[in-house]
Image: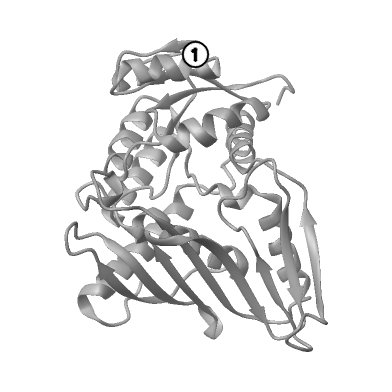
Amino acid sequence: MSATAQVRWGILGTARIALRSVLPAFRAAPHATAVAIAARDVRRAHEAATQFGIERVSESYDALLADPALDAVYVPLPNDLHARWTLRALEAGKHVLCEKPIALDTAQAHAIAAKARETGRYVSEAFMIRYHPQWRRAVELVRSGELGDLLAVQSWFAYDNPPGDNLRNSPVHGGGGLYDIGGYALVAGRLLFADDPVRVIGLFERDAQYGVDRLTHGLVAFPRGRQLSFGVSTRLPRLQSVVAHGTRARLVIETPFNPLPERPTRILIDDGRDLYGAGARVETIPPADQYAAQLESFSTAILSHRPPEYGIEDALVNMRSLDALFRSERSGTWEHP
């Protein structure tokens, strides 16, 4: 792979995550460049192109996918459009980085996997946390044995999305807490345990007006008796935390999901010798742009003709686990992914 080679990207939409996080990250990804953008509102596409130095604006999503100059497409559209446009992009011969969730159910995700195999193109679900140095370090500490045997992981992710005309309040568009942010807990557990869920159960509280889940807790069983417990909410004050409990020490990631790229992050390791931190130490991780790292990882995989670190098979595990949690709401019992 040439040091100057670049993957030429097209952007489908001007969602907030694209404008705030992903488009700025192209500046810090040496092997990725944003070449074209399309949006339902062409004016917004032109504004984004001007702001981020994107060469051209396509008149429609289909026109962007038909552009032979593009190698890959980033899909930050509403959740209910992820599967449709990922499939269309694969059919157009593009590699795809799609925002989470990859689809709204396992059947849609399997269709994406089949199309990816048919076309020989790569698909990755955009869980950017996996590329941040703080998560690389957390996984390293767990694997080193410093925590002892890792038995439990606890995750909390909350923000306040008030009532109103918002896609996150729409069941039709895949709104609600579990679709929006529940996948982060699953990814956290899978990363730290280096394994996949075997059964799940969820407790849901739904908004009476909109029908979406605004407070959800899940219990996820992993092989050998290990457990992930998590809570997500779209109606509570902002808070994030991941705690990994081993037989010798616990590890805390203070800002596990949305650390600012310009700020350092911290990992706490505490052997629990008392309740006042006598056995604690803190590791500070230098600032890093996890979105740029994600773009760079996927782009270098394309240029090197090797599968991405996290491909469509990984996304299928996440989708099956989400599906099982939703089934458990209806059945009231454990479900298997």
Q: Is the residue marked by circle 1 packed among few (<14), some (14-19), or many (20+) residues within 10 Å?
A: few
Looking at the image, residue 118 lies above or below residue 222 = above
Residue 290: image quadrant is top right
Give the x, y percent position of residue 298. Answer: 58, 37
Query: Which residue of the protein is positioned furthest toward the bottom in this rendering?
Result: 274
Q: Is residue 76 left or right of residue 166?
A: right
Q: Residue at x 69, y 72 (%)?
A: 251
Q: Residue furthest left?
A: 209
- The answer to whether one can see residue 317 in this image is no
Q: Position of residue 238 (x, y in %)?
A: 48, 58
Quarter where residue 291 is shown: top right
**Which quadrant: the N terminus?**
top right
Q: Position of residue 230 (x, y in %)?
A: 46, 72
Colour scheme in use: one colour
Q: Is residue 162 left or right of residue 30?
A: left
Mark 1 residue element: helix
Comparing 228 with 163, the one in front is 163
Q: Is residue 327 left or right of residue 280?
A: left
Residue at horizontal 60 percent and vertical 58 percent from the top: 256
Amino acid tagged 1 = Thr
Q: Number of marks in the image?
A: 1
Vertical placement of 197 versus 95: above or below? below
User: Is 24 in front, or is 75?
Assistant: 24
- Percent position (x, y) of residue 183? 44, 59
Q: Residue at x 32, y 45 (%)?
A: 79
Quadrant in which the C terminus is drawn:
bottom left
Q: Mark yes or no: residue 142 visible.
A: yes
Residue in the image at 19% along x and 56% along y = 210
Residue at numbered disc 1 = 50
